[in-house]
Image (cartoon, helix red, strand yellow):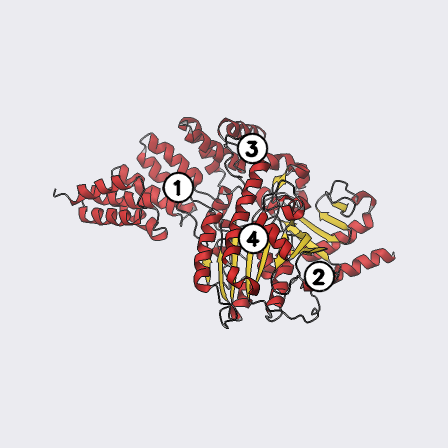
Amino acid sequence: MRAAAATVCLFLVACSAKQSEPPAQTSSAHNLVIITIDTLRADHLGAYGYKDAHTPTIDRLANDGVLFTHAYATAPITLTSHASLMTGRYPPGHGARHNGMRIDLKTPTLADKLGEAGFSTAAFIAAYPLDRRFGLIKGFQTYGDRMPPARNGRMINERPGRDVVDEALSWLSTHGGTPGTPGTRFFLWIHLFEPHAPYGDPADKRGLSARQRYDEEITEADRQVGRVVDTLAPVRNDTIIVVAADHGEAFGEHGEIGHSIFVYDTTLRVPLVITGPGVPAGRTVDDRVVLVDIAPTVTGMLGVARFDADGIDLRPAFNGTTLPNRALYAESFAPLLDFGWSPLHSLRSDRWKYIDAPKPELFDITRDPTEEHDLSGAESKRVAEFRDASARLAGPTTLDTSGIDPEAKARLQALGYAGGSATLPQGKRADPKDRKEEAARLAQVTSGELAGKDLERALRALLRSDPANPQANLRLGYVLLESNRCKQAIPRLRAAIAAHLPSADAHLGLAGCQVAERQFDSASATLRDAERIEPGNPVVMANLGLVLSDGGHPAEAIEPLQRALTIDPDLHQARFGLAVAFARAGRRADAASTAEELLRRLPPDASQRSEVERLIRETRRQP
């Protein structure tokens, strides 16, 4: 009885989620750099004992500062986890409980707090889930989230870490501060998408496994971290550097491939390293911590007013003080929002970790860190206490997703997020554990690890068990389209359209097949339908303009092509198409000036330059 009462008391402390002020500490920290590496498992870094790692920069940072051996995310979801890091709040407190859901803009952010204190603030991100529309721009004076131009008619939703760091270093060159100079403080957040799937090139002829290519991607992320650290050398003694991940990655553990569905520590455990002024070198902290602790810790180190957060200030641990024993919360709404299954919530306290699901699980994570032995059957009273505490933290199990716009859903699906619907009543939702094989098959397909005939076989197998699966139909449609089998692709693409996918991809594929058959009017109608689904998608607008122009209606093509370029001025194919449409409509001067503008925008070595130059000559020639 006494142990149970202590457990309940601990939960009440956790629910209040506030910590008394830590002992006053002196700090000379002047600047802050946070580097988040997407999908990075802690146990694949040298600093965490991984013998095959090649991560010299992160390992060196760990040696220079404090390494947390048991750090955890609040969700295995990119946006949700980053929102917790930047707000210091668990997901119910910031509202972005899945990719595509905007944070509650009333929630204070770390950038808010530091901007108010006079810091220059900037963020440079590598993937669409952190696009400014989802609210993490709040408080940042500069927010670099521009993705590369569309390719082959499809939006690009990620970019290499090298490009992100190039932008960040350019910003640092003018905002990097001078040691000891008042008024030049800065906060820089850099997000790297390596090693998110697909890892490297799955078609690499070296025959490397997915894990080996994943490790190579980690090495590339470490290389980019090194560029940042080297550039910070003049202000390093004044600068806090935090390196963390948003979540881990599963390679078959618990039947999961990838991340987002389950809340086992395979995907919740993350690396966390903090170094900077006042941080002892070579310290290892084994207490359990969570990403919501970062904001109150770094604001304390910077001497900024206390940050109101669900997390705690970790500075006492820097000097060997044991951190308070807390209950740490995590969740995933991906099962609900992507598949219509039950959401999952977890709570860890002391030696126990509870997972709230239709079939709850309880693990003694001290003795069973890989969560293999469910003890819920023998611990019914403890399970009931955990269930009640988890429910108090989690709040409602249904969410308002009306704010997720169709384009966001479509672009997240392109990155491998399933994007289904949550239509089943709560009492009938499946336990994700009972559907893990289905989820793993879909993850294998969406991961980018399969190609060609292997991908086609996997998609056909998935459709045999789930013939109406919209994502499988869409992806098989594109496999068939790309191998010039339009007659087989069209039924698949139409099935995806009939399932009301919040994406124009199926329409773009179908229109491509219709153009191949010279059915320009049908293709135009298909693309107008696509515009109703994604009204702000410049790729849809550009394709509509190209089809109208090629179908004999160049004057009608001009308006959608111009709209596309208003949204994305670097959509070079649209600009070339606009020049051609002007020429076909008899507007030769407009055609020439448009082509000349395109020539100015193209790189010097672009293969398209000769064709653009030919168009300029023809339009400048007297009729």
| Left or right side of 541 for 210 | right
Amino acid tagged 3:
Leu
Q: Is residue 274 left or right of residue 506?
A: right
Residue at left 52%, top 68%? 179
| Residue type, mark 2 in image | Ala
Asked whether, in this view, residue 354 is left or right of residue 32, the answer is right
Disc 4 packing (10 Å; few <14; some 14–19; many ≥20): many
Which corner quadrant holds the C terminus?
A: top left
Question: Which residue corresponds to mark 4?
Answer: 36
In space, the residues marked 4 and 2 are separated at their CA atoms by 22 Å
In terms of secondary structure, where does tag 2 sit? Answer: helix
Name the residue tied to disc 1.
151
At x 44% / y 27%, what residue is drawn? 488
Mark 4: which secondary structure?
strand
Tell me the residue that label 3 is attached to. Answer: 208
Mark 3 or mark 4, whichever is nearer to me: 3
Q: Does residue 185 lie above or below 571 as drawn?
A: below
Tell which tag, 2 or 1, sits nearer the viewer: 2
Q: Nearer the viewer, residue 280 or 95?
A: 280
